[in-house]
Image (tube, rainbow, N blue to C red):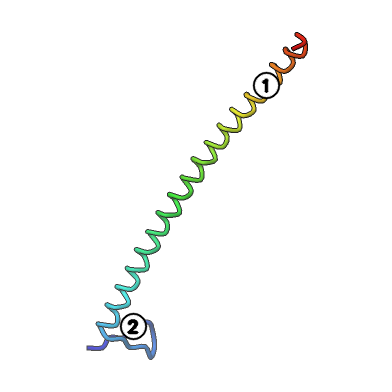
């Protein structure tokens, strides 16, 4: 059986249409999977950015404390 699809002069068999629909479904599935991967990677990046910020803050506090200790030692003549 043939059916007219997609306008003038374009005939496709039912099997061809079904194959195209299956291919479209597969492509949508791949796109959905890719979107999930992107979201997961973005979440990982955000977590790493938050961890980096916490480490930077801890480093800054430690550096500031070291300067304070160094100043106290200098005043005490150590």
Tell which of 21 and 46 is nearer to you. Answer: 46
* Residue 62 point in image, percent of width and height: 63, 24
Residue for badge 2 = 5
Q: Going 33% across and 88% down the picture, which residue do you hit?
A: 11
* C-alpha span from label 2 to label 1: 76 Å
Mark 2 crowd level (few <14, some 14–19, many ≥20, 10 Å Cα): few
**Taking 70 as reference, is 43 left or right?**
left
Say whether disc 2 or disc 1 marks the residue closer to the N-terminus.
2
Front: mark 2 or 1:
1
Pick the quarter of the image with the N terminus: bottom left
Residue for badge 1 = 66
Mark 1 crowd level (few <14, some 14–19, many ≥20, 10 Å Cα): few
* Residue 61 point in image, percent of width and height: 63, 24
Tell which of 55 and 37 is nearer to you. Answer: 55
Q: Is residue 64 above or below residue 8?
A: above
Q: Going 39% across and 88% down the picture, which residue do you hit?
A: 8
Q: Going 57% across and 34% down the picture, which residue do you hit?
A: 53
Tell which of 75 and 11 is nearer to you. Answer: 75
Q: Residue furthest top?
A: 76
Q: Is residue 74 above or below residue 52?
A: above
Label annotation for residue 54: none
* Residue 49 point in image, percent of width and height: 54, 40
**Taking 54 as reference, is 6 left or right?**
left
* Residue 22 point in image, percent of width and height: 29, 73
Q: Residue furthest left?
A: 1
Tell which of 19 and 66 is nearer to you. Answer: 66
Pick the quarter of the image with the C terminus: top right
Q: Going 33% across and 73% down the picture, which residue do you hit?
A: 23
Quarter assignment of residue 20:
bottom left
Q: Secondary structure at mark 1?
A: helix
**Taking 30 as reference, is 62 left or right?**
right
């Amino acid at each position: 059986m043939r059916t007219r699809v997609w306008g003038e002069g374009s005939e496709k068999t039912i099997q061809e249409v079904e194959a195209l629909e299956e291919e479209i479904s597969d492509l949508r599935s791949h796109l959905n999977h890719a979107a999930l991967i992107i979201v997961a990677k973005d979440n990982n990046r955000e977590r790493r950015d938050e961890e980096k910020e916490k480490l930077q803050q801890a480093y800054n506090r430690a550096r500031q404390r070291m300067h304070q200790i160094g100043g106290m030692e200098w005043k005490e003549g150590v």
